[in-house]
Image: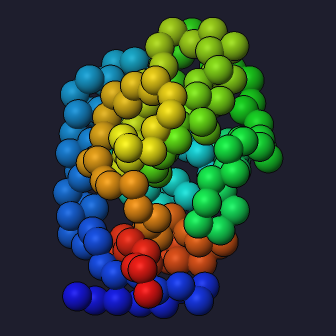
Amino acid sequence: MKTIKAHNKKFELFIEASEISRMVDNIAEKLNHDLKGEEVIFLGILDGTFIFAADLIRKIEFDCQVTFVKMSSYKGTLTTGSVETLIGIGTGLEGKTIVIIEDIVDTGLTLERILKLVRDQKPAKILTVALLFKPDACIRDIRIDYLGREIPNEFVIGYGLDCDGFGRNLADIYKITGA
């Protein structure tokens, strides 16, 4: 098993880049089928989703807009239980199809907060995309319309996911080990 060290913590290989690529391809294929002809704005949640969002958007075959919001709910390997908005949502969402892109949904607090902010701007439709979902960690009733895969409630890094900013650059996704 391939292991790495990031920010003085040990991690083992969990999801290889080839599998991540297949998940992105599957999500893009469904979005291309379902949203063709709609006025779509993709809304990525920074920082973690920047790689996933870039890979996904490059596979979208219809005209769309892309924007980002920056939220924070983690310190180290633990969720803080609160969500802080660092860069807010712009205007111009009214009457449009908004596709929120999340790297990972664990507690559901960040996605719940974004959904409220987006709903306040009266879009025609709101859809959610997540590469990863931790159902055992989720404490909110969150619907994910397009999902890469469910994972256990373990801390992961790589492919944009981080531990205090470290590990985002990894092509694969790694889970923390007990050691």
Establish if 13 lies above or below 111: below
State which quarter of the image contains the C terminus: bottom left
Relative vertical location of residue 126 with respect to residue 170 in this rendering, above or below: above
Total marks placed = 0
Residue drawn at point x = 46 percent, y = 23 percent: 141
Residue 65 seen: no
Q: Is residue 155 visible?
A: yes
Answer left or right for 148 relative to 108: left
Residue 9: percent from left, percent from top: 53, 85
Q: Quadrant of residue 145?
A: top left
Q: Residue at x 24, y 52 (%)?
A: 23
Residue appearing at x 41%, y 62% in the figure: 154
**Residue 34 placement, left or right of 55:** left
129 and 15: which is toward the camera:
15
Q: Quadrant of the N terminus?
A: bottom left
Residue at image position (45%, 27%) is 142
